[in-house]
Image: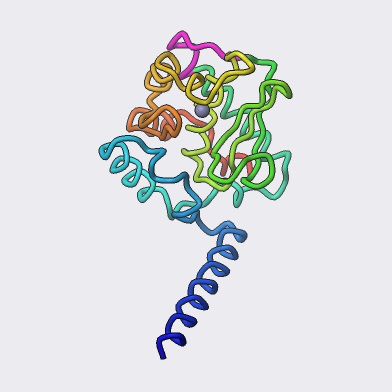
Amino acid sequence: MRTDTKRDDVLKRELDDILAKIETALGKRPRDDARPPEETFGTDADKALDREVFNRHKHERLVIDYFDSPKAAQRWVDALGDAIKRDLLTPNGLKWDDRFAVALSVQGANLRPYEAGSTWPIERKVWVDAMQPPVYVAATLAHEYLHTTQETFISNKQAHGPEFAAGLNAMGLVGPATASIPGPKFEEWFKQHAPKPEEFE
Ligand SMILES: [Zn+2]
C-alpha cells in the first residue's frame, strides 16, 4: 500500500509538472516556480514586497501574448526604451550606452532560467523576458539599461554595487539590486507615461 501511495504521489507530481509546462508554453501566466530562488530576494521585507507586487500582476496578460509579429513587439520595446531614457534615466543623471540593441526573448533562448533580463556587453545586446506582464518588462529594461555602461568583465556582485542600486532606486525600482522589481513610483510612471503594448499590437 505504502509503495502505491508513494508511486501515486510521484505520478501526480509528474502530471502537475507537465501541466505547468504546458501552461507556461501557452503563455497563460507566469508560474511561481519560474521565478528566481527565494534567497535572491534579500530581506523578509523585500520578499513580502516581491510577493505583493507579483500577486497583483500575476493574472495580467503577458507581453508575449500581445504581439503577432516580431516587428510590432520591437516597435513597442523601442518606444518603451525611449520613454525610459526620457523620463527615468535622463532626469536622474543616469547614463546608458545607445550602441546596445534591445530585444525581447524568452528564458531558455537568450536568457537563462530565472533571468528576467540580461545585458551582453560584447554583442552589445539587451534581452528582456517577454513572458512577463508589461510593467515587469519595463522594470527589467530600466534595470538592464544601467548595466550597459559598466565594464565588460565584472562579477555579478560588482555589477550590482551601491552605485547601481542608487540608480535603480532613483528610477523607482525597489528590492535587492540583483532582483529589482517595480516600486510604487515606477508603477505610477508606467501607468501614466509608458507606451502600452496594446497600442502596438
Ligand atoms: Zn542586473
Q: Is residue 83 left or right of residue 51?
A: right
Of residues 159 and 183, which is closer to you in this image?
Answer: 159
Counting from the top left corner in percent of width and height, residue 165 is at 41, 20
What residue is drawn where x is 42% and y is 32%?
180
Image x and y of residue 82, in percent: 58, 22
* Side of 109 where 178 appears, left or right: left
Callout count: 0
Is residue 188 positioned above or below 146 on the image?
A: below
Single out the residue that lies furthest toward the top: 93
Magenta highlight range: 87-96
Q: Quadrant of the N terminus?
A: bottom left
Q: Magenta stretch containing residue 89, yes or no?
A: yes
* Residue 102: percent from left, percent from top: 66, 28
Q: Is residue 85 above or below residue 119?
A: above
Q: Is 179 left or right of 23, judged from the image as shown?
A: left
- The location of residue 194, given as percent across then percent down, is 49, 30
Looking at this rendering, what residue extends furthest in the bottom direction?
A: 1
Q: Residue at x 65, y 47 (%)?
A: 108
Task: State which quadrant residue 152 falls in.
Answer: top right
Where, quadrant-wise, is the C terminus in this rendering? top right
